[in-house]
Amino acid sequence: MSEKQESMAKLLPDDVLTIILRCPAPHDLAMSRCVCKLWCTIIDTHRMLRVDLLPHSVGGIFINFHDLGLSEFFARPSTGPTISGNINYLPLTSIVRGHCNGLLLLYSHISRPGMKQFYVVNPATRQWVQLPPPPRPDIGIMHLDNLYLAFDPTLSSHFEVFQIPYVDVFRHRSELNPAIEGIEWPPSTCVLHVFSTRTRQWEERSFVREGEAAGSLAIIRRDFPNFLHNAVYCRGVLYVRCQTNFVMRISLSDGKYRIIKPPVEIERYEESNIYMGLSQKRVYCTFFDDPDIIYILDESYGEMEWVQKNAISCLVIHAFQQTDGPWTLQDITIMNILMRTDMTTAIEEQNFDWDSDNDNFINTTDERNLRYGRITFLGFHPYKEVVFSSHSLSRGLAYHLNTMKFRGFGKIQDLGNLGPKYYGGCMGIQPFIEESFLCTPWMGEFPKDIN
């Protein structure tokens, strides 16, 4: 700002300028802070820009175990923002199906026949919003509960929910009419149902495809129902993992979308799902099961290509399985079954956060102490080059990617036991992890008029 413009800004009374500066969204307010010393002083004095409320740490990991009716919460007791995985304040028992910048998307499997109930919850403040019922699926298209959050607290406290269609065209028949089999998917113009807290209703929004389709219906429909609820939202773009591991890159600002093909190595494994995540403002992916290769999305020059970044070893020390770790599992299922109020209260009063690079290291230099185990991917650390995984459904691990060297050995932390109590064969179920969601606490509040 020039001296003349700064002088003109000073003509406004401070109280009037204060009222004006309360209007912009957080992102615009942050830019306004750089205009001149006067504006910077007013913004800082009145604490208008609450950066301390924004997500900046990992509060824990919500994990959906097969055949358990509630999401479990794996976290490290510390001094960070308080988060409890026991979301027992909703009208119906619900399970976590998505996360975006501190908000959780939950789905209730206990409701009236033919009705699905969804909630968006801020576990840090215990605020929640019940979504109106999503539109019914079109003939031949199965929407299921594939809803995905888009939320950026640096811009606004409003959020949107996108319903992404999945192909379910007569999946029980081995062949269809050749004309139908050859239809490309997704279509050139994809009409999505979108819920916005600004309008408080579902609306149709059209997105035009740039580039090639993912394939024909004959190929895409064979992947049903082999899908994983997985999406990333960053800088106005929603990346959704879809059938056959293709990624739908949806640009909210210009109404366009592109298809990103999976890495070549993953294309060879039809039964493998990819897991995407955001780390240091870049989109990553790997295998959900046995994540031995880490990829990063290269969007330079508009090519949209997965590039191998790291190889990590699925060999881990076997001797750690009898020791305690710095993280704990809240064991929500057992708490709710046994109705142990004293136990629930004690856990809810703890703070859960993780920001340590020095917890419980595993010595990987002596390969004689290493054993193979079933590794399931849990998520990417959003602010560090760290990935989380589960070893044999018993231990949580943290791999530091910037230390991974030849054969994928490097700095690994044993976080502790993440297996739910009594979970396994004795419960008469097949034990495995279906989904997981890293939670980054957002201490802000929803707009007052969205309920």
Image (cartoon, rainbow, N blue to C red):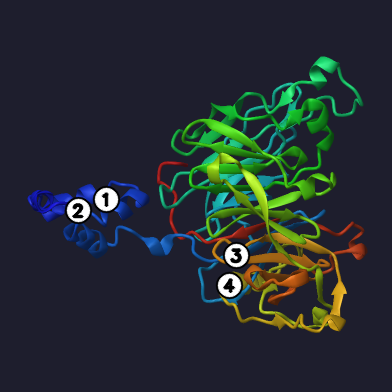
Q: Which residue is mark 3?
A: 84
The answer to whether the residues at label 4 and label 3 have Cβ atoms under 8 Å apart is: no
Q: Residue at x 67, y 49 (%)?
A: 306
Tell me the element at label 4.
loop
Residue 126 is situated, as x and y percent measured from the top left of the image, at 53, 57
Q: Earlier in the sequence, mark 4 or mark 1?
A: 1
Q: Amino acid at mark 2?
A: Thr
In whole angstroms, how far apart are the C-alphas of marks 1 and 3? 32 Å
Q: Which residue is mark 2?
A: 18
In whole angstroms, how far apart are the C-alphas of marks 3 and 2? 37 Å
Q: Earlier in the sequence, mark 1 or mark 3?
A: 1
Q: Which residue is mark 4?
A: 354
The answer to whether the residues at label 3 and label 2 have Cβ atoms under 8 Å apart is: no
* Foreground disc of the pair 3, 2: 2
Q: How many neighbours does mark 3 have within 10 angstroms: few (below 14), some (14-19), or many (20 or more)?
A: many
In whole angstroms, how far apart are the C-alphas of marks 4 and 2? 37 Å
Q: Earlier in the sequence, mark 4 or mark 3?
A: 3
Tell me the element at label 3.
loop
Q: Amino acid at mark 1?
A: Arg
- Using the image as rendered, state which of residue 338 and residue 50 is in the foreground: 50
Q: Amino acid at mark 4?
A: Trp
Residue 277 is situated, as x and y percent measured from the top left of the image, at 63, 54
